[in-house]
Amino acid sequence: MKSELLNIFVSLLNEIENQFGHVVKILRSGNSKEYFSTSFSTLLNSHSILHLSTCPYAPQQNSIAERKNRHLVEIVRTLLLGANLPIHHRGDIILTTCYLINRMHYPSLDNKVPYSIEINLYVPFLLKFLVVLCMMCVEVGTNSQLELSNVS
């Protein structure tokens, strides 16, 4: 929930510092009002974290996150439609997709697994994928959120 942002962010800061030995220097967020509350701004100032906010409807400012979100939505849409699953399964499919993506080798990362880089540990991922069904969904660009249906 939005009201829990401060507590969740404090937990995230502690987890990043304790597990990875890194300090958060910059936070980029949308323009939601909870990111601009007095208590959240005080927390950011006390940790010397620079807060950058993006302009609404300007995905160019956060192209990596926008591409990742679009990629996830496209995979979920394809899996839901390809398997004829009801839309209420989208949460499980998103979690599964994120899990698999974070454990696949990427040429841009010297064929390393993103998850292993984050935890600084070699994690072999030996799963071989077989493409059984290939489906394509075409998206018509709008400023609204992407829909999880076969008509975009």
Image (cartoon, helix red, strand yellow):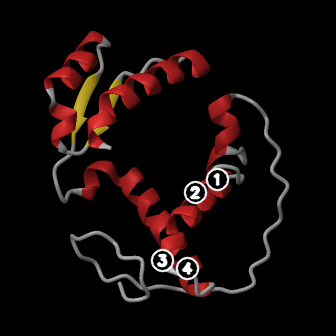
Sequence-wise, which precedes: disc 4 or disc 2? Answer: 4
Q: Which residue is mark 3?
A: 87
Q: Return the x and y of residue 25 as percentages of the image width and height.
A: 36, 21
Where residue 142 sits, quadrant-wise, is: bottom left
Q: Return the x and y of residue 103 as percentages of the image width and height.
A: 70, 50
Q: Residue at x 70, y 45 (%)?
A: 113
Residue furthest top in the image? 46
Circle 3 SS class:
helix
Where residue 101 sits, quadrant-wise, is: bottom right
Sequence-wise, which precedes: disc 3 or disc 1? Answer: 3
Neighbourhood count class around disc 2 (C-alpha, 10 Å): few under 14, some 14–19, many 20 upward: few
Eye-nearest disc, 4 or 3? 3
- Do callouts 4 and 3 mark residues in contact (Cβ within 8 Å)? yes
Q: Which residue is mark 1?
A: 99
Circle 4 SS class:
helix
Query: CA gap, disc 3 to disc 1?
Result: 19 Å
The three-letter code of the residue at mark 4 reads: Leu
Q: Which residue is mark 4?
A: 80
The three-letter code of the residue at mark 2 reads: Leu
Q: Residue at x 23, y 71 (%)?
A: 144
Residue 120 vertical placement versus 72 (above, below): above
Circle 2 SS class:
helix
The three-letter code of the residue at mark 1 reads: Tyr
Query: CA gap, disc 4 to disc 2?
Result: 13 Å
